[in-house]
Image (cartoon, helix red, strand yellow):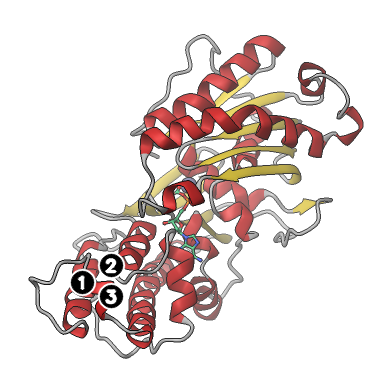
């Protein structure tokens, strides 16, 4: 079963091809980071237009990588190598989702291959099922997770703990009540003048900072597996204003120029410590309550080295995490999830009817 997966929910135009949910054949991603950098965040209209510009070239390159022997053939002939098409139909930015979904619908109509609309957040978890590849430059886990499976999903739009009893049979243990953890990384980076996207910038600065230099609060919520990052974000703002020599009236736009490098690194390290500890504490607690066979981390923030290190240290089993190129948005994870849908005889979606769902929940 070879599935082609299309992902355009935010600012990555991505097409990946995966065999049997485990073997990576191609993973082509065009990121719009450089375009959105100037604005300090994703501009939805610009993102949708950029997806239109990149989509056909990304599709072509992904097919050529997976099937080099057919690289001289037409796109339609190349598509004869695949068995099904999967696409992110939610959650995400509506304009962005539309480009991927309409592309997938058109390809399904032209080729007659079955079409599977998939949930982006669920797709992040399935990146961890991809365990081997002949492509160079990938560090894959070597084995797929087994059920019951505890998934910590940490991305720019989501923070949740999910217990999968089996494929498509899961229970949401908890989720964020306000900001996602990746969003908090991005906002703290903006506040301290570190470049977009904030996650990697904070992680890099934190290496040169003292994580105990600023005392920051951990949120306490009624439901043990829920998360909240808005209080932490405000606490970082207050600490940054104070380090910059001002009080709560100092605008966040003015803070970066008043901070020196050393202070920025200390803010990054102190914030990262509390943010990571928060998600690790809850994952460890869920592990002891539910005794899963595997633990995976998924989503862009799963690329964070400190998160990986802390989970390795505190869990009695080795958590599964994948190559950083498969943690951030990509089409391969969508293809992997599509493989399991197709293998389990899920009814395909109608290519005339599949609609986007920007607010799709797990
Ligand atoms: O999964 P993803 O690519 O997109 C969403 O579905 O949201 O995640 C993007 C998020 C951004 O907030 C980015 O700052 C964060 O992942 N991120 C990181 C790291 N790399 C990406 N956060 C912390 N440390 C990293 N190394
Ligand atoms: Zn994502």
For numbered disc 1, what is the local secondary structure? helix
N-term mark: 3 or 1: 1
Residue 339 in the image: x percent, y percent?
Answer: 67, 34
Residue 2 position by quadrant: top right
N-term mark: 2 or 1: 2
N-term mark: 3 or 2: 2
Residue 102 in the image: x percent, y percent?
Answer: 52, 19
| Foreground disc of the pair 3, 2 | 3
Left or right, residue 15 beside residue 305: right
Do tag 3 and tag 1 residues touch (Cβ < 8 Å)? no
| Foreground disc of the pair 2, 1 | 2
Q: Which residue is mark 2?
A: 191
Say if 301 sits above or below 357 in the image.
below
Could you tell me which quadrant the C terminus lies in?
top left
Q: Which residue is mark 3?
A: 257
Q: Which residue is mark 1?
A: 237
Give the residue displayed 53% in from the left and 27% down from the top.
52
Residue 358 in the image: x percent, y percent?
Answer: 36, 31
């Amino acid at each position: 079963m070879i599935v082609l997966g299309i992902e355009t929910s935010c600012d990555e135009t991505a097409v990946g091809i995966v065999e049997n949910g485990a073997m990576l054949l191609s993973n082509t991603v065009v990121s719009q980071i450089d375009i959105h950098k100037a604005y300090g965040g994703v501009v939805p209209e610009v993102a949708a237009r950029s997806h239109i510009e990149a989509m056909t070239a990304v599709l072509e390159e992904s097919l050529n990588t997976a099937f080099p022997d057919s690289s001289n053939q037409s796109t339609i002939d190349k598509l004869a190598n695949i068995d099904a098409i999967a696409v992110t139909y939610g959650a995400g930015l509506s304009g962005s989702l539309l480009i991927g979904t309409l592309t997938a619908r058109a390809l399904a109509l032209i080729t007659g291959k079955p079409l599977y609309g998939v949930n982006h957040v669920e797709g992040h978890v399935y990146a961890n099922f991809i365990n081997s590849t002949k492509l160079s430059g990938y560090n894959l886990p070597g084995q797929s997770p087994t059920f019951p499976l505890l998934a910590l999903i940490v991305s720019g739009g989501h923070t949740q703990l999910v217990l999968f009893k089996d494929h498509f049979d899961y229970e949401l243990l908890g989720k964020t009540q306000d900001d996602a953890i990746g969003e908090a990384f991005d906002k703290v980076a903006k506040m301290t003048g570190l470049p977009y996207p904030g996650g990697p910038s904070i992680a890099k600065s934190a290496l040169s900072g003292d994580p105990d230099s600023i005392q920051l609060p951990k949120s306490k919520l009624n439901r043990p597996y829920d998360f909240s990052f808005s209080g932490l974000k405000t606490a970082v703002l207050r600490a940054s204003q104070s380090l910059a020599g001002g009080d709560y009236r100092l605008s966040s736009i003015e803070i970066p120029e008043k901070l020196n490098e050393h202070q920025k690194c200390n803010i990054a390290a102190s914030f990262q410590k509390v943010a990571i500890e928060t998600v690790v504490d809850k994952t460890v607690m869920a592990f002891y309550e539910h005794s899963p066979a595997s633990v995976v981390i998924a989503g862009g923030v799963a690329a964070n080295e400190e998160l990986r290190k802390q989970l390795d240290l505190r869990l009695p089993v080795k958590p599964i995490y994948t190559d950083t190129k498969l943690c951030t948005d990509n089409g391969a994870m969508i293809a992997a999830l599509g493989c399991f849908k197709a293998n389990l005889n899920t009814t395909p979606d109608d290519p005339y009817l599949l609609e986007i769902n920007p607010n799709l929940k797990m």
